[in-house]
Amino acid sequence: MLIRLPPRHDILPSEITPEGVYLSRRKLLGGALAAGALALWPAVAGADRAGLVPAVADDPRVPAWLRRQVAARRPGSLSAPPDALTPFEDVAGYNNFYEFGTAKDDPAEQARDFVPHPWRVRIDGEVGKPLDLGLEDLLRNVTLEERIYRFRCVEAWSMVVPWTGFPLAQLLRRAEPTSRAKFVAFQTLHDPDRMPGQRSRWLRWPYVEGLRIDEAMHPLALMSVGVYGRTLPAQNGAPLRLVVPWKYGFKSIKSIVRISLVEKLPRTTWAELAPDEYGFYANVNPSVDHPRWSQKRERRLPNSLFSPNWVDTLPFNGYGDQVASLYRGMDLRRYY
Ligand code: MTE
């Protein structure tokens, strides 16, 4: 998300102007760059990511049962775009995870020592059976599958990622949603000691996101615990994150500790910070430009900004045949 760099002293979110350009403090190239950096910044930030990606496949800090369960994933049926996969190094080296810094290579570096085990997730609100589950209980008897999804960031870069996970609907059903459950609210861990980005106050922590209940129940909405057959690297949202492939990437909230079924449209981090730029629905839509850039095309990682290989962005990120009916009758220019 391209936002203005907060000054050294902490400021309230309400004081942040969502216009302008965010410059990473480590990649700060001088005030003179401010105008041009909007285009330059992501490419610069990704330039030195080689070597930042830990060998997660056999990370001894991850429980062996989880590594085995992820490795034993089955091929999923609801995926497989014809596009080439984005290399693991880019999936795990070019990230947005503001709890671990604001440059694209900050999360891989700053989350190195983040060990998300043990981990608990609470499911509460409008449910018949509130749950408070350790990760092992959450994944007990769950068949993990691999789904290859396109992943489109609102910043106009994209990836094709083999996620390992299971349908969110499966987890929600275990809590027995009541008829008053109209929306689902998700919350990331809040722990500034372990997530240093949360010590600054430019975003209101914890990061929160939400879906309408029918979106959350859609078979494409995935809870992911792995990529490329390995458990999720911390920078990708370990141990458990959401992946909603037809929406801009900011809806895919990471490191989830709480899921609440609620009656009213929940508060969401980016819509609260800049409602004109990041809506609640955030369906990928090439015909609605972001106020500061076009959404018609996207840069597939690992291509740089200067690569000629930009591709057309597809409505609903190419999943329209499966999800467009969720929005029948809605003006998607208004509810973006
Ligand atoms: N979840 C949390 N908790 N914090 C974040 O900063 N960034 C979002 C989303 N989920 C974010 C988050 C954004 S803007 C994007 S594009 C994706 O994560 C990036 O996911 P990736 O780094 O695994 O590619």
Image: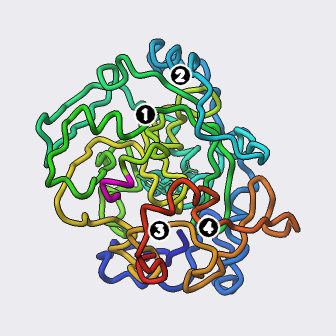
Mark 3 is on which residue type?
Answer: Ala
Measured in 3D between alpha carbons, the distance from the residue under mark 4 to the one under mark 2, in whole angstroms, is 31 Å
Q: Residues within 10 Å of mark 2 (few under 14, many from 20)?
A: many
| In this rendering, the label closer to the viewer, 3 or 1 | 3
Tell me which numbered mark, 4 or 2, is placed earlier along the sequence.
2
Q: Which residue is mark 2?
A: 70
Q: Residue at x 58, y 60 (%)?
A: 320
Left/right of residue 22 with respect to residue 298 in the rendered view? left
What is the C-alpha distance between the residues marked 4 and 3? Answer: 11 Å
Give the labeled residue for mark 4: 315
Q: For numbered disc 3, what is the local secondary structure?
A: loop
- Outermost residue on the left side: it is 128
Q: Is residue 210 magenta?
A: yes
Question: Badge 1 is on which residue?
Answer: 239
Residues packed near mark 1 inside 10 Å, few (<14), some (14 to 19) or many (20 plus): many
Q: Which residues are magenta?
A: 209-215
Under mark 2, the amino acid is Val
